[in-house]
Image (spheres, rainbow, N blue to C red):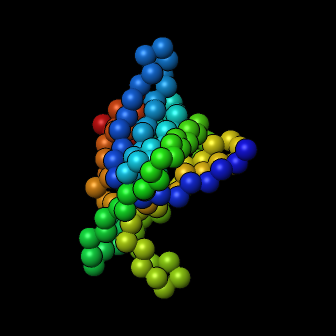
Amino acid sequence: MQLDFLFDVESVERETVPDAPETIVLHFGSGEFSAEVWTDAAGMAGLVGAIIEARPRAERSPTTWQPQPVAIYGLTIRPRIELAGIEVFPPGREEGEYIPYWSIVLSDEDGSQLHMALSEETALRVAALGMREMEQDGFVE
């Protein structure tokens, strides 16, 4: 079943699976809400590369944007996707309106998507969490 989730990201953590060391799990958190993205080194390198490629297009925000935590008390939802698609949009103007945050859309093969709004700091943290894969792919010397 295809599902879409839209949320502001407050934190991101990286985990490896002990029984499958080639598997990388990213945990994106927002208040009581958390989403998992399962991928491998190639997927992680793709995500980092998309952020690095988009960074020169990022416009500086006239104000500091802060994520708003998701509040869904009494309801536990934890979407989990296996990374198949990546779209990254830096802060900037879209149809005349200024968008002050990074927008990252991650999708899986069935079309489910996580639409995430991230601060500059959090977007760069995602990139930093994947630098190991970038080095292995020869992107970083």
Which residue is more in the foreground, 102 or 8? 8
Residue 80 point in image, percent of width and height = 56, 38
Question: In the rendered view, would you say 55 is above or below 48?
Answer: below
Please tell me which residue is depicted at 27% across the width and 79% down the height of the picture.
Answer: 62
Q: Residue 18, located in which quarter of the rendered image?
A: top left
Position in image of residue 59 (x %, y %): 35, 72
Q: Residue furthest bottom?
A: 96
Q: Quadrant of the N terminus?
A: top right
- Asked if residue 28 can be seen in this view, the reply is yes
Which residue is drawn at the image coordinates 31% and 68% (left, top)? 65
Q: Quadrant of the C terminus?
A: top left
Seen in the picture, residue 61 relative to 7 is either above or below; the reply is below
Question: x, y (%) of residue 30?
Answer: 39, 51
Residue 134 appears in the figure: no
Give residue 87's quadrant in the image. bottom right
Left or right: residue 128 compared with residue 98: left
Residue at 58% x, 39% y is: 81
Q: Quadrant of residue 61?
A: bottom left
